[in-house]
């Protein structure tokens, strides 16, 4: 097994570019995030009151994610999308490295999504209420029964091509290693009998590491792996292990690439 590694180092900022870089970060990146969240979030809330929740999510929330990804100078590559069948709902299970993972999944996959997110995000001004109005799923991570009840309440919306996204680690990883998976995603897949898609996200921690505002431009990658079909007698623990192993393998391949590049 590959040894535990910290996040890969961020691209350095040359002394010549230090001032322009910081001016761009604080005068462009941060204001665009704040303004776009306020403007598009308010528009989404209004449209949701008019009964256009899915339209708002598909169009304006996607615009928000793509706009902010572009402004952060993040180059996004998506692989394996051809593995998803049109009109089929999936449970998407992804590793979580950075806050900008949201930009990648929401802005560049072209999929109708409902998110499973921690309840604390409901308190974020505008954004929290907009997500609630769009039908995203808030869970109380401190209470397993309440978390499962929230997920069960959302089951009816996961059909006709609508997918649900889980970060089953429950939080962002502070290293390149995958944390243990919680089982909610796999219980939903089992209950609804819809396939699980393992999703590996690469290098977003080089763009914005966890717990910092130390943004850098950079290239990131998202890979859709082969769907895991759900048998009638599927075991939740085995599904979690199988999915995690697929993502771990993809992340370990990325570690090897980093080593070879650095050598």
Image: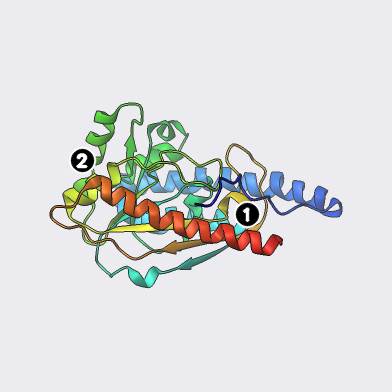
Left/right placement of residue 79 relative to residue 31 reads: left
Q: In which quadrant of the rendered image does the C terminus lie? A: bottom right
Outermost residue, right direction? 16
Relative placement, left or right, of 19 versus 143 is right
Residue at the location (41% across, 38% down)?
170
Q: Residue at x 52, y 45 (%)?
A: 99
Classify mark 2: helix, strand or loop.
helix
**In terms of image quadrants, where is residue 71?**
bottom right
Question: Above or below — where is 238 with respect to 147?
Answer: below
The image shows residue 108 at horizontal and vertical percentages of 47, 62
Among the 4 quarters of the image, the one containing residue 218:
bottom right
Q: Could you say where residue 168 lies in the image, as x and y percent from the top left?
A: 37, 44
Residue 15 showing in the rendered view: yes
To which residue does mark 1 refer?
72
Residue ID for mark 2: 152
Q: Position of residue 115 (x, y in %)?
A: 36, 47
Circle on res. 157:
none
Up/down of 198 relative to 174, above or below: below
Disc 1 secondary structure class: loop
């Amino acid at each position: 097994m590959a040894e535990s590694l910290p996040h890969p180092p961020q691209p350095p900022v040359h002394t010549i570019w230090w001032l322009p870089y910081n001016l761009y970060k604080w005068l462009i990146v941060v204001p665009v995030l704040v303004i776009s969240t306020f403007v598009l979030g308010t528009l989404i809330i209004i449209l949701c009151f008019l009964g256009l929740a899915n339209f708002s999510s598909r169009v304006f929330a996607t615009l928000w994610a793509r706009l902010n990804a572009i402004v952060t100078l993040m180059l996004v590559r998506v692989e394996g999308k051809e593995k998803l069948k049109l009109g089929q709902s999936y449970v998407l299970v992804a590793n979580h490295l950075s806050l900008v993972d949201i930009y990648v999944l929401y802005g560049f996959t072209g999929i109708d999504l409902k998110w499973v997110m921690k309840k604390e995000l409901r308190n974020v001004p505008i954004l929290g209420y907009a997500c609630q109005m769009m039908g995203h799923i808030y869970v109380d991570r401190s209470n397993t029964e309440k978390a499962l009840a929230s997920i069960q309440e959302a089951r009816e919306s996961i059909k006709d091509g609508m997918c649900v996204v889980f970060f089953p680690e429950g939080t962002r990883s502070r290293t390149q290693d995958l944390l243990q998976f919680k089982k909610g995603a796999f219980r939903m897949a089992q209950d609804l009998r819809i396939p699980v898609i393992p999703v590996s996200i690469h290098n977003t921690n080089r763009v914005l590491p966890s717990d910092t505002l130390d943004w850098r431009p950079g290239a990131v990658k998202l890979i859709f792996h082969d769907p895991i079909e759900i048998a009638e007698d599927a075991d939740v623990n085995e599904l979690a292990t199988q999915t995690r192993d697929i993502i771990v393998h993809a992340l370990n391949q990325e570690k090897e690439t980093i080593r070879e590049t650095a050598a």
